[in-house]
Image: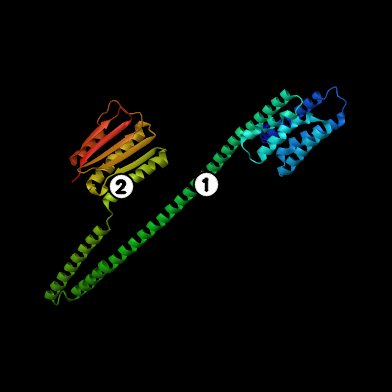
């Protein structure tokens, strides 16, 4: 409870500190007025009432909504004080003029305008000091503090806008993933329906026809053997044709190995980010269509081996898989920012990587001095 009250008082002071400063400053000037009229035969009650009225108006000026009305009352109170009680009330004029300059947004150098009224002051030195002090106080508040407060508000607004933008982008990204998943699910269902229909139309028709012919063959096998041979030949040919159609259909529906390997590499990086909090990135440069299916298989296997080793031993926070397709060469670099390894021994994993790259006529280089880096060069056929 005490902490809450302290926080509330602190916020209250931050919002109203300038009001308190102005009120205290006005009281200080009232003291100056009374000191300047000491020894004169004047109506002290009237002076005190006028000075208190001026100080009150100046104190509440920052807290009201319709400031222009109170600004007019502030000038009227100061001028009435000067008229009724003497020029001592001129020390309150710099505050009124500064309020007007701030209210109408005039240039900051205008806060020195009260210096022009020095000719009406009895104690010119004191009046000049009060004018300079007033200019400093107003410049500090309106020229510095309000400027930084506006900048802070702008930054906070910008931060909220960025947060809203990020939230909107994240929601849009989720919606896009959902739409994409629905699209591919629909495509898969259509492909399954198409495959089922083709198998039913082609294979089912041939099998049913063969069954009918075999049943007829069984009925006449003892009475017309030559007819049985003819029927069996047709059944064999029909089944052989059906088998060829099934092979052709399966070859056509077989997923693209190159595309599948690339998607598996992307999924590998995504798993590192989601499950282990490691920033894993895949960067492919050049024409990836030049990479044949066999090379994609080697890249996938070696990248999986390298990432697995990095997760086990390197204590890294970043993994980068770079695939650069050149004119006659394919370069793949797998690197991390982990602890590295000064002495590298060819275990089963590294031996397997070297064997796979060697079968394609490529070379592999491993460096563990700064993190861990594996470079592979594979010729492009």
What is the x, y in percent for residue 231?
16, 73
Q: Which coloring applies here?
A: rainbow
Front-lying residue, 69 or 380:
69
Badge 2 density bin: few <14, some 14–19, many ≥20, Cα 10 Å: some
Distance Cα–Cα, label 2 vs label 1 = 34 Å
Q: Residue at the spot x=27%, y=45% of the render?
A: 286
Q: Where is the N terminus found, in terms of image quarters?
A: top right
Q: Decide if residue 337 is on the left or right side of residue 141.
A: left
* Quarter of the figure with residue 58: top right
| Residue at 81% in and 26% down | 34
Quadrant in the picture for residue 363: top left
Task: Please give the name of the residue rendered at 71% of the width and 39% of the height, measured from the top-left corner.
Answer: 63
The answer to whether residue 24 of the structure is visible from this angle is no
**Whole-percent x and y of residue 276?**
41, 38
Secondary structure of the residue carrying tag 1 is: helix
Q: Which residue is mark 2?
A: 262
The image shows residue 133, relative to residue 202, as above or below, that is above
Rendering coords of residue 190 (x, y %): 35, 62
Residue at the spot of label 1: 164
In front: mark 2 or mark 1?
Answer: 1
């Amino acid at each position: 409870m005490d902490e809450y009250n302290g926080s509330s008082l602190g916020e209250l002071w931050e919002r109203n500190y300038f009001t308190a400063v102005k009120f205290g400053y006005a009281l200080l000037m009232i003291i100056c007025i009374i000191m300047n009229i000491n020894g004169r035969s004047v109506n002290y009650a009237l002076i005190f009432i006028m000075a208190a009225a001026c100080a009150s108006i100046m104190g509440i000026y920052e807290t009201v909504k319709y400031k222009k009305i109170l600004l007019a009352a502030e000038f009227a109170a100061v001028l009435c004080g000067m008229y009724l009680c003497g020029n001592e009330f001129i020390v309150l004029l710099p505050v009124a003029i500064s309020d007007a300059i701030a209210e109408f947004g005039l240039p900051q150098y205008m806060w020195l305008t009260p210096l022009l009224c020095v000719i009406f002051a009895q104690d010119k030195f004191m009046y000049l000091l009060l004018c300079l002090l007033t200019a400093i106080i107003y410049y500090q508040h309106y020229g510095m503090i309000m400027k930084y407060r506006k900048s802070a508000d702008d930054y906070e607004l910008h931060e909220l806008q960025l947060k809203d933008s990020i939230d909107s982008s994240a929601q849009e990204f989720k919606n896009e993933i959902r739409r994409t998943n629905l699209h591919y699910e629909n495509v898969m269902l259509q492909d399954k329906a198409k495959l089922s229909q083709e198998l039913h139309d082609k294979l089912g028709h041939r099998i049913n026809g063969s069954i009918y012919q075999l049943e007829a063959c069984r009925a006449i096998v003892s009475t017309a053997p030559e007819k049985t041979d003819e029927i069996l030949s047709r059944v064999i040919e029909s089944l052989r044709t059906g088998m060829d159609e099934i092979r052709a259909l399966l070859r056509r529906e077989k997923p693209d190995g190159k595309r599948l390997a690339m998607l598996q590499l992307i999924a590998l990086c995504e798993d590192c980010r989601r499950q282990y909090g490691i920033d894993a990135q895949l960067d492919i440069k050049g024409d990836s269509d030049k990479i044949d299916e066999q090379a994609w298989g080697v890249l996938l296997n070696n990248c999986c081996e390298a990432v697995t080793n990095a997760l086990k031993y390197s204590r890294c926070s970043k993994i980068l898989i770079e695939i650069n397709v050149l004119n006659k060469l394919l370069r793949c670099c797998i690197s991390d920012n982990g602890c590295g390894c000064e002495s590298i021994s060819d275990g089963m994993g590294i031996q397997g990587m070297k064997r796979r790259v060697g079968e394609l006529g490529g070379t592999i280089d491993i460096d563990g001095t700064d993190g861990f880096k594996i470079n592979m060069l594979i010729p492009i056929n």
